[in-house]
Image (cartoon, helix red, strand yellow):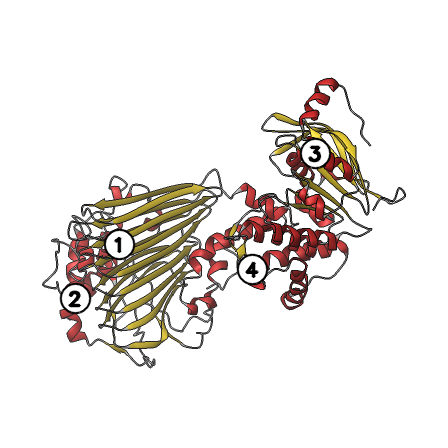
Amino acid sequence: MIRPEAPVLLEIRDLHASVADQPILHGVNLTIRAGEIHAVMGRNGSGKSTLSKVLAGHPAYTVTGGSVLYRGEDLLALEPELRARRGVFLGFQYPVEIPGVSNLEFLRVATNGRRLEQGAEELDTFAFEDLVRERLAVVQMDPAFLERSVNEGFSGGEKKRNEILQMALLDPLVAILDETDSGLDIDALRIVAGGVNQLATAENATLLITHYQRLLDVITPDYVHVMAAGRILRTGGKELALELEDRGYDWVDAELAALAAAPLEVR
Amino acid sequence: MASLSMPTAEAPASSWGTALLHTLAAEVSREPALAARQQAARALAERPLPSRREEAWRFTDLAPLQAITPALLAPRTTAPASLPAAAAGVVRLLLDGHGDPLAGVTLPVGIESIPAAELGTLLQKPPTDRGVEGASASTHAAAWAGSEAPWCGLLAAATAGQILALRVKGVVEPTLELVSEAATADGVLPLRVLLILEPDAQLELLQVHRAAAASLTTVFLEARLGAGARLSHGLLGQGSGAAVLLAELTIDQEPASHYAFTSAVAGWALSRLEPRVLQSSGAATSRLRSLQRVDGRQIADQHSQVRFEGPEGKLDQLHKVIADGAGRSVFNGAVAVPRAAQRTDAVQLSRSLLLSDRARIDTKPQLEIVADDVKCAHGATVSRLQQEELFYLRSRGIDAARAAGLLLRGFCGEVLRELPAAAAIWQPLAMVLGEEAPRP
């Protein structure tokens, strides 16, 4: 929901970033207010995933310019774990398998870190089990997955459900979901999208990074941004996603050529 | 058993081993010291201390051993108070190298002590032995080891004044726990154990060796598994400071027997484990799981040998290492599959985590395969903590140190979860990671 008076949660200004000395982001600008759902679309290599990794603080990515304010605070100055505890969540495109680490314990340690930051009390193993069983319903996940190692041997759909379960437990203010729809069949997509819809409130915001319109059939974005060559080329409403579905991305190349290297102000 | 006098100042010994033998001379020559011990002492006397010019000791510096006083530890007068109480369903034997570990203990149903008269015969070379001259007479598993008997085995056989010898029949319900603790003084704690598992016998065995002071714990354990016997064998080695552990384990398996070994060793200035498994006619199952961690300037070494002397044997071996600080880890995994061992199915994996730029890991699979119809796989990896795994945990609010800890626990868990259940009271994970743990 768009409310011009809603507090700004995330403010990205002229963000430049590189990985392995290869510049990827060339001046991203984006403002996200509470209650909003944003979708960032674009071709492979347009910088979408890099944007999500930079926001989460992946050590392989170097910010070379610009700023990101999270609720007025310099997000880029925070270690990844502090970003998470303050309420920034990244749902991974490829959730990582961690052999030997119990999913339940992992979820409990993560949840308690966030709770302490929120001023809530830590949950002991019993209280946490009650909470996690309740949140499992959000993604219709089998409790048996709690007993396994983190993501180990999970199918693609199970991994994504586990991501949304983590989101449900960590109660983020800004959730960045990187290609959450990739590798999901239509039923799993519905469940995962249902979870995201259920967790969206007037106080938090969601940034969906996706390749396809089909996720946006089940999660309605307030804004759609088209990313190309490391910046946001155009911003519109949900109809922009439909237009992309119709026309493909070829027009992006034409627009890029026309823009050349000129700086871009979007929203 | 009479206690020995401590060494007196003598002419310089040619090596640490002969110095130790010198302090034992009176005892070894005395009747009725076992012929096997005298034989081992003679063989040891002729052997210099292993040097790094020998392939099997190439990476392993014995300086920490030579820093130990070459004399037996004095007998302890009371049971160590620091030991956790034995868990329910566990029969604990305390080994101190002097007293009778069976005194005051009711052995569980199915386990009996082997009388001294019979022990002498058992330790003589069996007729089927493919023994090598100079090999410790008791170990037909050791005899095949190469041109020489293993030095660690000889050392333990020569120094141990008593042998805990047990025969196992049927299914033994309680876990047998053998505990030693070199806590008090400067010297050597020699331990020798012989287990005979009758056909179809089943036993869960847990060895726990701890050391607090500059001492050497030297262990020689032989287990002979009859047809269809099952031995689940755990070994925890918790060292500290300047302590040294040398352990020789020789396992002989008849067909259809099942041997599962799981070890976790950490904290020693120097530790060396030599598990030697012989499937005397093949057709048995061996499962080996080991974890060793080094930090500071510690050295941890495992030289394992598995040999199939007949067809259709199975081996599943996993060796894991955590190397931190300026620690040094050595693994050599020999697997011998001679022509007679057709249809052997063997897997050996070595997984090492290198946590410091100053640590060093040497890992070497050594498969000698002559038979042609076999499945033998091996692999070795040395890596750092996976950055993607670390980032994933950190992105969930888990700080870097705790994330690394979780990954380490996961790494250890793969081995530790296979320890006998009775190992839990010793807190093996805390022990390996050097965290708060029961201390001698």
Which secondary structure lies at badge 2?
Answer: helix
* Chain holding disc 2: B
Q: Identify the residue position indicated by label 4 in the image.
A: A145
Disc 1 and disc 3 in contact, CB within 8 angstroms: no
| Image location of residue A156, percent across then percent down | 55, 49
Q: Amino acid at mark 3?
A: Asp
| Image location of residue B383, percent across then percent down | 45, 41
Mark 1 is surrounded, within 10 Å at the Cα level, by few (under 14), some (14 to 19) or many (20 or more) other residues, namely many
Q: Identify the residue position indicated by label 1 in the image.
A: B152
Q: Image height check: is A13 above or below B91?
A: above
Q: Are marks 2 and 3 on the same chain?
A: no
* Chain holding disc 1: B
| Image location of residue B10, percent across then percent down | 24, 53
Which of pointers 1 and 2 lies earlier in the amino acid sequence? 2
Q: Amino acid at mark 1?
A: Cys
Q: Residue furthest front?
A: A246
Q: Identify the residue position indicated by label 3 in the image.
A: A246
In the image shown, does B120 or A150 lie closer to the viewer?
A150
Which secondary structure lies at badge 1?
Answer: helix
